[in-house]
Amino acid sequence: MSTSIDIRSVTKTYHRGGEALRVLDELDLQMAGGTFYALMGPSGSGKTTLLNLIGGLDHADSGEVLVGDEDLTQLDGSSLAQWRAENVGFIFQGFNLLPVLSARENVELPLLLAPLSKRQRREQAERALELVGLQDRMDHKPRELSGGQEQRVAIARAIASDPQIILADEPTGDLDRTTADSVLELLQRLNRELDKTILMVTHDPQAASYAGKVIHLDKGKLGRIDDNTAAAARS
Amino acid sequence: MPWKLLFRNVLGHPMRSVLTIGSVAVAVFLVCILHAVTAGLRSTVSAASADRLLVQSAVSLFVDLPLSYQQKMAGVPGIEAICKWQWFGGRYEQDKGGFFQQFGIDTDTFRTSYPEISLIDGSYEEFVKNRTACLIGTELAEKYDWRVGQTVPITGTIYQRTDGKAWEFLVAGIYESSSPSIDQQTLWFHFDYLHESLEAGGASGPEGVGVYMLRMAKGTDPISVQRTVDAMFENGPQRVNTTTEAEFNRQFVSMLGDVPSLLQMVGGAVLFAIFFAVLNTMIMAGRERTRDLGIMKAIGFTDRTTALLLVGESVLVCSLGAAVGILGGLLLEKPFQAAMSSFIPAFAFDKNTLLLGAAIALGTGLISGLVPGWRAARLTTVQALREVG
């Protein structure tokens, strides 16, 4: 069953140099499970902050962040860590692979937190790498891979533990157009074939075109939501 | 705990890891050596016999006592035997840099006064019978390949023969000692041989006795004997200082200064230096891994696990350093023993020395890892990922 996301009157303020900066301002937003969302908006509009709150990486000052049945604002640090391990896969702009581990070991990393045997972990990591088309690069270290391959490893790591939600922060920001398209196609496949709920922060309209819905944020508030389903289906 | 990541992090910077392991190894090795020296010195003092007193000049150990004192002291109640000791200070010409002690002693009272010495080759009777005979320690015999029946030439530096030749001593026996207060590298010869040579004009040098050893009868109060002997020569010609053997050994060691304290201070300084070096390395490693820590936390690893990863890395590096240092110490124990046995017969890497080395390394690793570990635990995922840029 896919997981829905419900943001209720969420406020988040950062304090920098004695100045309070309200990044999210009483934001209300509902996202259906099993949908590929793109999150757009100008810099400082609160995109990454919202992504962090939904991923349980940060705490809201007020309001509720409901992911599935869980209100993340009620969880403490270690409970959030456990929740993240079981429910969310992250993809970052800078790939963020551990340089000392091979592709397979990077993908196995989140599986260390699951009750799996060594063999099961290995098999599951290999399946994830096959899914992203890197079956012949499993033993390569990140420095031996291209940018696109590194991001595919990051995607494999994000899906290895079979989370319902995948959160991607500018996943194609460091990639050329062709490579970016192949990564976006992969995300689209994960949404369509595995019913994952995907929330992708992007500045790039072309990247957003792969999403079914595009959420526009502006100064911490919801601007509008564009339904892109038909266009995305053609891509 | 992601053990593989822990090991990979150590192997990820091979040069840094090797240098850190090497510096910990050197520190552990040095601390073990220093501990072995101080323990050896203490052991030498504590292994001293309780029924032996030593009489030396009250002025200095280097001032000789008159020969006539022996007869006077013999009348003191409780003294069973007296043995003269005289430092010879000779040198074996074939090994000018080598050092070992030679003493002239009284052969008739020496053996019964030092039951910890036993002959493994030769005969004490032969030693007593032959005026130019000597006893040598097992290590000395091994070092120069000297055997019973062989004549060894020793050139006197304090006592020189008037014919310009070296003194010749016939090896009559090879001894070993069961007590660390007596080393295995000493050469003992007849005090009378030296004395008679001086009297006959065959040699030149100071006449007298360096130290008188007094063996007390069972049940004798040593303090009473000490007081009686000291009082006996209160008005000269040479005032004396009578001490227990333990006190004599302690004073001998302290002639070089407070060696154990000095060595402990050196050891402490080494530890401080290495602690800061490892701490600096681990703080650097922790900062470099900020991004990795952020990723791990985002994936679902707890603050505790990320902290333990850094503590574990530090402990692993220091443990490897300790292992190398202790192994090096064990491999070099014998050569060190051979080099130091004349000064510190009890020098050895005992269990306590090895445990101390291991404990120091583990403690250094633990404390050095706690600083970056604490930072890692406090670091929020967002902060860590933001530092990536």
Image (cartoon, rainbow, N blue to C red):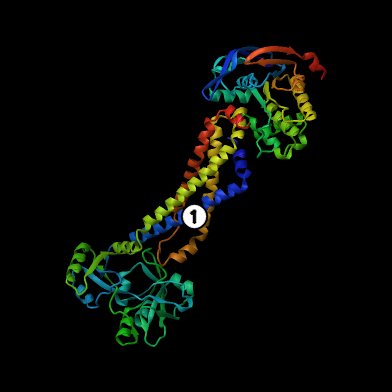
Res A13 → quadrant: top right
Quadrant for the C terminus of chain B, please.
top right
Query: Residue B95 appears at what percent x and percent y?
Result: 48, 75
Q: Nearer the viewer, residue A120 or B323?
A: B323
- Name the residue rendered at 46%, 63% in the picture: B337
The answer to whether residue A141 shows anywhere in this view is no
Circle 1 sits in a helix, a strand or a loop, which is it? helix
Q: Name the side, left or right, on which A203 lies relative to B363.
A: right
B34 is higher (above) or lower (below) than B174: above
Residue, disc 1? B29
- Name the residue rendered at 29%, 80% in the picture: B207
The answer to whether residue A118 shows anywhere in this view is yes
B89 is higher (above) or lower (below) than B23: below
- Mark 1, chain letter? B
Could you classify mark 1 by the number of other residues whose Cα lies within 10 Å: few (under 14), some (14-19), or many (20 or more)?
many
- Name the residue rendered at 50%, 57% in the picture: B329
Query: Residue B373 appears at what percent x and percent y?
Result: 52, 36
B119 is higher (above) or lower (below) than A187: below
Q: Nearer the viewer, residue A29 or B196?
A: A29
Circle 1: residue type: Phe
Query: Residue B116 appears at what percent x and percent y?
Result: 35, 67
Q: Name the side, left or right, on which B144 lies relative to B44.
A: right
